[in-house]
């Protein structure tokens, strides 16, 4: 078998055979298939698609490229959540300890942000001392201690995906449903969770801009999970506006702690509780009610144990950016638009995100929203505060926000927070 045969087959719109898929993933992982050949194949897949059998076999081949974790020694069921990424999406932070407090184990491998969407690990690293890299033994110890662990995937987990994702990122081949679905699900299945809830974001701040595309991605991932024996459901949720009121690393940790303390913005609380219920149901755990666990402090206790078990100080003062400026309402009326992509891009330009994988992030940078779509505002009232380490960053953030917010006489209809459930 050679790479050209596989590329030409997909280029000409044919189904790839099992042998072709197994060979190309294995040979690419070993370095026998060159990056330019894989890049060409990824483009052919983006243009011509893959059917359900091909996607399932592609996913299984990526799982086989590395280790498969196993949590069967734990006495309680495991549950995990994966979000396809959004602006202000800090839900994993309160959700993992919340679900742990309600009786399931949550072994969660998370990622760093790239582009305008933030990464869970970058957020948690704003907590002094907190460590993202854990060995499998350390992961197990944190799980036993706190019921939840959030850490970086080791290099042994789906290495084929690690290589392929980095390649897709620089070759315009990210936005392919078969490639996104197999990338996400290979890691989640290899992670060994017994059940999985997918939060598939829809809107300007998400990979999937329309409900139709998000539904197709969700259905593909739910089928992959179910075929692999992982109980999987998906929610389609709104990402046309940012989630919550804080966007940035330390800022989102602060907001998550507010939720764990029984407060926080209504949309963050609603989605956290809904996802917790879905995870507990998928895991077959009928313990405590998540709303109760937020009120009685048990979710906060699990958070504190989880942070401390990974070297962090849950009482530490979080980093703050040195500079701030407000963006004020241009007139009185209703905030009709607050575009997730514009706000995410502005936060990224303020220093909250990174342009290249090796870049550092600013922990204190980001945006605090003082109004959300549908709120009444007065002319001159602050709509948001921008935070950055240098004032020089404000001008480019303001450019990103240009046209991204609007005040008008009447409310404009938004996507419901939870649009649909699949599975
Ligand atoms: N997240 C992933 O892990 N993979 C993708 O392809 C897209 C988002």
Image (cartoon, grey):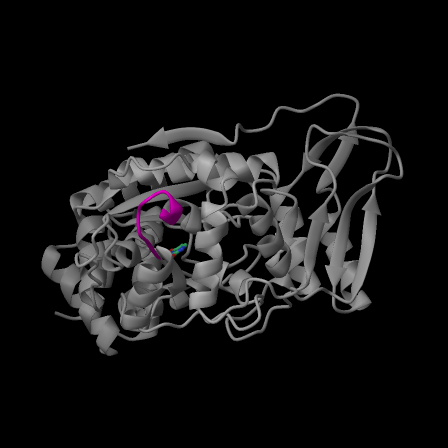
- In the image shown, does 15 or 113 lie closer to the viewer? 113
Classify the position of ligand 1 by quadrant: top left, top right, bottom left or bottom right.
Answer: bottom left
Residue farthest to the bottom?
Answer: 31
Instruction: Please indicate, yes or no, whether residue 11 appears anywhere in the rendered image.
Output: no
The relative height of residue 338 versus residue 49 in the rendered view (above or below) is: above
Relative vertical location of residue 300 with respect to residue 383 in this rendering, above or below? below
Percent across and percent down for residue 192 are: 23, 56
The residue nearer to you, when weighing 246 against 222, is 246
Q: Residue shown at 49%/40% (left/top)?
A: 296
Number of numbered discs on residues = 0
| Residue at the extreme top of the image, as rendered | 410
Name the one closer to the observer, 91 or 213: 91
Percent across and percent down for residue 252 are 60, 53
**In the image, farthest residue toward the front:** 296
Q: Position of residue 306 (x, y in %)?
A: 43, 60
Q: Which residues are magenta?
A: 100-107
Q: Is residue 156 above or below residue 177?
A: below
Please give left or right for residue 194 compared with residue 297 in the image.
left
* Quarter placement of the C terminus: top left
Residue 159 vs 177, above or below: the answer is below
* Residue depicted at 81% across the width and 47% down the height: 327
Residue 38 in the figure: left or right of residue 119: left
In magenta stretch: residue 104: yes
Q: Which quadrant holds residue 146?
A: bottom left
Q: Which of the pair 125/141 is nearer the observer?
A: 141
Taking the image as shown, residue 412 lies to the left or right of residue 415, namely: right
């Amino acid at each position: 078998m050679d790479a050209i045969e596989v590329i030409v087959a997909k280029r000409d719109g044919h189904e790839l055979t099992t042998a072709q898929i197994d060979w190309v993933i294995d040979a690419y992982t070993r370095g026998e298939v060159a990056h330019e050949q894989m890049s060409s194949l990824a483009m052919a897949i983006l243009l011509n698609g893959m059917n359900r059998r091909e996607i399932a076999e592609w996913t299984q081949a990526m799982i086989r490229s590395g280790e498969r974790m196993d949590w069967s020694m734990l006495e309680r069921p495991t549950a995990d959540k994966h979000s396809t990424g959004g602006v202000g999406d800090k839900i994993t932070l309160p959700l993992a300890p919340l679900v742990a407090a309600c009786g399931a184990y949550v072994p969660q491998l998370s990622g760093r942000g790239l582009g305008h969407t933030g990464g869970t690990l970058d957020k948690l690293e704003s907590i002094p001392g907190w460590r993202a890299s854990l060995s499998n033994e350390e992961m197990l110890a944190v799980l036993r201690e706190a019921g939840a662990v959030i850490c970086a995937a080791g290099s042994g987990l789906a290495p084929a995906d690690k290589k392929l994702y980095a390649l897709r990122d620089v070759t315009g081949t990210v936005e392919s449903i078969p490639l996104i679905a197999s990338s996400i699900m290979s890691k989640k299945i290899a992670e060994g969770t017994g059940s999985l809830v997918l939060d598939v974001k829809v809107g300007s701040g998400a990979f999937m801009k329309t409900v139709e595309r998000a539904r197709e991605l969700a259905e593909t991932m739910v089928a992959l999970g179910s075929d692999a024996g992982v109980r999987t459901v998906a929610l389609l949720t709104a990402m046309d506006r940012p989630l919550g009121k804080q966007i940035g690393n330390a800022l989102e940790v602060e907001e998550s702690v507010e939720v764990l303390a029984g407060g926080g913005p209504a949309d963050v609380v609603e989605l956290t509780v809904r996802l917790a219920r879905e995870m507990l149901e998928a895991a077959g755990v009928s313990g405590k009610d998540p709303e109760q666990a937020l009120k009685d402090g048990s979710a906060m206790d699990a958070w504190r144990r989880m942070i401390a078990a990974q070297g962090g100080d849950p009482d530490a003062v979080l980093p703050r950016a040195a500079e701030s400026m407000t963006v004020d309402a241009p007139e009185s009326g209703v905030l009709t638009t607050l575009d997730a992509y514009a706000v995410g891009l502005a936060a990224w330009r303020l220093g909250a995100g990174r342009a290249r994988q090796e870049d550092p992030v600013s922990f204190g940078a980001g945006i605090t929203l003082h109004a959300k779509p549908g709120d009444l505002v007065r002319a001159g009232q602050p709509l948001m505060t921008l935070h950055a380490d240098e004032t020089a960053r404000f001008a480019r953030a303001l450019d990103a926000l240009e046209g991204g917010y609007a005040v008008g006489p009447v409310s404009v209809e938004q996507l419901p927070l939870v649009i649909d459930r699949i599975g």
